[in-house]
Image: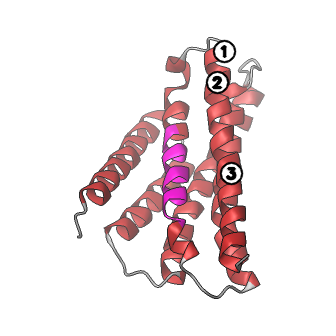
Amino acid sequence: MTTSLLVLLMFTGIISIGIGNILMAFASMVAEFKPFRDYQLGVLWLLILLESYLSMFWNCVLLAERETWEFITFLYVIAGPVILLFASSLMTKLLTHDEPGGPEIRMQEEIVITRFFWLFAVSQLWTLGIEFLLGLEWSYASLVSVMVAGIAALLAIFKQRNLRWYFTLAVVSLMVADIYIQSAGIHL
């Protein structure tokens, strides 16, 4: 068994756990008949996380092409899905908890949301590191990662709900454009 295969097994295993985490949160919300309108922003972020996991999984082919591995490189590669797993765990816990919303709970929720956005920003920067590690050229996808990381950092800093909606819609727009450009085979 090659080292690349072992790295891919760990990489895809962590991604699978993260995807399962998100799907179980959706299943819990559906099973408990929770109205999505109360959690629209969080549900949107779960969908963004799901797209991030699927993109990570889709691009793992590039990892298989790497011939030599060092332990530090392996740790860096595994860090990306682990960071997203932590982020998705924060968001799913936030969306599936049933405690009443007193002031202490709202303050704790804000701490969780802030951590989530910082983790998501770091995961986008991790993507840039992977591109560098694999010797890929700077591309439109790299620019999208930088912009999404910046927006996620702004989301962690700014606490106003309206701003969070606008920034979230900007992230969705960037990700949809990125999916379209990659699917259409357009090289920018």
Q: Which residue is mark 1?
A: 31
Residue at image location 51% in from the left, 49% down from the top: 155
Q: Which residue is mark 3?
A: 85
How far apart are labels 3 and 1 at the CA level? 23 Å
Query: Amino acid type of disc 3?
Result: Leu
Q: Which residue is mark 2?
A: 27
Image: magenta residue range: 47-60
Q: Name the one closer to the observer, 47 or 183.
A: 183
How far apart are labels 3 and 2 at the CA level? 18 Å
Query: Amino acid type of disc 1?
Result: Ala
In the rendered view, tell whether residue 34 sits above or below residue 127: above
Q: Position of residue 44 (x, y in %)?
A: 48, 35
How far apart are labels 1 and 2 at the CA level? 6 Å
Q: Nearer the viewer, mark 3 or mark 2?
A: 2
**How many C-alpha atoms fall within 10 Å of the one at disc 1: few (<14), some, or many (≥20)?**
few
Please indicate whether residue 162 sits to the left or right of residue 134 in the image: left
The quadrant of the rendering that contains the C terminus is bottom left
Predominant SS of the magenta segment: helix
- Callout 3 secondary element: helix
Q: Position of residue 15 (x, y in %)?
A: 64, 53
